[in-house]
Amino acid sequence: MQVYGKNYHTIWVHPDNKCIIQVIDQRKLPFEFQIIDLKTTDDAYEAIRNMTVRGAPLIGVTGAYGIYLSLINSNDGNWKTNLLKMADYLKSARPTAVNLSILIDEMVSLLADCGTKEIACNMAFKEANRMKSREIAWSEAIGDFGCELIEAISKKKNGQPVNILTHCNAGWLACIDWGTATAPMYKAFQKQIPIHVWVDETRPRNQGARLTAWELSQQGVPHTVIPDNAGGHLMQHGLVDLCIVGSDRTTSTGDVANKIGTYLKALAAFDNRIPFYVALPSSSIDFAMKDGVREIPIEQRDAEEVSWMEGKLGNGEIGKIRVVNEQSPVANFGFDVTPAKYVTALITERGICNATEEDIMNLFPEKKDEMKG
Ligand code: MRU
């Protein structure tokens, strides 16, 4: 996708040095566009943990490159033991997005039979690149399927823009290219289908206001940022035609973990009979889980994210201001779970399906072995 007219992914191999992985520093957006070098497993771990990179698909691919970096930095003698240690370490960086453990486990099993460190390094490089390309292809396919939904609504609106509400950033920044929730929007926009996106600001980290709004404006897609509480009101007044959100982990039964606040949007959409779609690649489906509310680990984050807000100050500098009374305790749950019954359908790289175990397994029959009894 475009940044100031130039095409970027959110992660790539340094053009002159294949031992360096480069990423966009998402903590600085939209105020500064900075690129960061990842040279070691620690760099990859920290980038995931401190949210330099964020969004489930990007976290997963950063983990895969983290495995590659761990091999580059291993000794010839201990690379296999180190590989397992580094895999566990990287997986511990963030708990909710399942893509991280899925891609790291995939890397480890692909590398298990390598005879030497050199062979393993070459293979890890190739596989991490392949996973990156696969994620981009999946996002684009999600875009094509989701665009059909937008097009169908557009046909009934006689040229009036289709109003799409989204939460958090499930855009190309979170997914390397295209995005998951945003891919159908970008595809529709390219096809000149009139759309307008309501962007939830997404407290406390403001991924909507800071990231989704920025990336939509970079591509020229009409949008409006709204406070998180506004969605229900807009829905009651016919100002939302459909919701599309992403997912950090979806169970085999269709329960969806996504950024905190998603569940409330799904409830409001349900009450107003507005379709609520979840766009996600299969790398975000946890086929071993069935009950999202009970089983999905929900990250609890630093209270500072709630009690302080970061932004551009009046003097042009980036700074933080305290917004919560110093004596008041704060809770900061990063994600919530939307039960499958509130999800109209899932938009995946293989097509659109109901959020039910039967329909999900029909799309991904090869995953039957991973399911719990
Ligand atoms: O905490 P983050 O920024 O890593 O949150 C993840 C997300 O971006 C969202 O929950 C998103 O909607 C799903 S990931 C494409």
Image (spheres, rainbow, N blue to C red):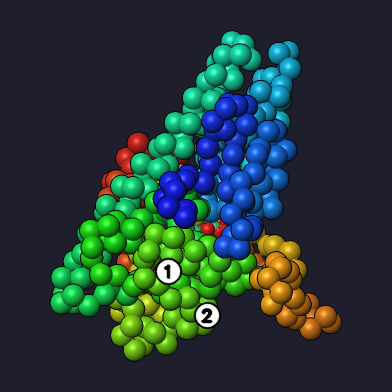
- Identify residue for label 2: 227
What type is the residue that disc 2 sits on? Answer: Pro
Residue 198 in the image: state x and y as whole percent: 41, 74
The residue located at (61%, 63%) in the rendering is 31
Q: Which residue is drawn at 53% across and 62% down?
A: 211
Marks 2 and 1, the one that precedes in the sequence: 1
Which residue does the image show at 29% across and 61% down from the upper left?
189
Please give the residue where the numbered disc 1 appears in the rendered image: 166
As drawn, which residue projects farthest toward the right? Answer: 327
Between the residue at mark 2 and the residue at mark 1, the CA separation in whole angstroms equals 12 Å
Q: Which residue is drawn at 58% across and 44% down?
A: 23
Q: What residue type is labelled 1?
A: Thr
Q: Which quarter shows the C terminus?
A: top left
Q: Could you say which is closer to the camera, residue 154 or residue 336?
A: 154
Direction from residue 140 to residue 266 in the image, left or right: right
- Determine the secondary structure under disc 1: strand
For residue 287, side relative to residue 85 (left or right) = left
Residue 333: image quadrant is: bottom right
Q: Mark 2 touching mark 1, by CB under 8 A?
A: no
Q: Where is residue 107 in the image (x, y as percent from the top left)?
A: 54, 30
| Disc 2 secondary structure class | loop
Visible in this render: residue 198? yes
| Residue 272 appears in the figure | no
Instruction: Give the quarter of the image for residue 268.
Output: bottom left
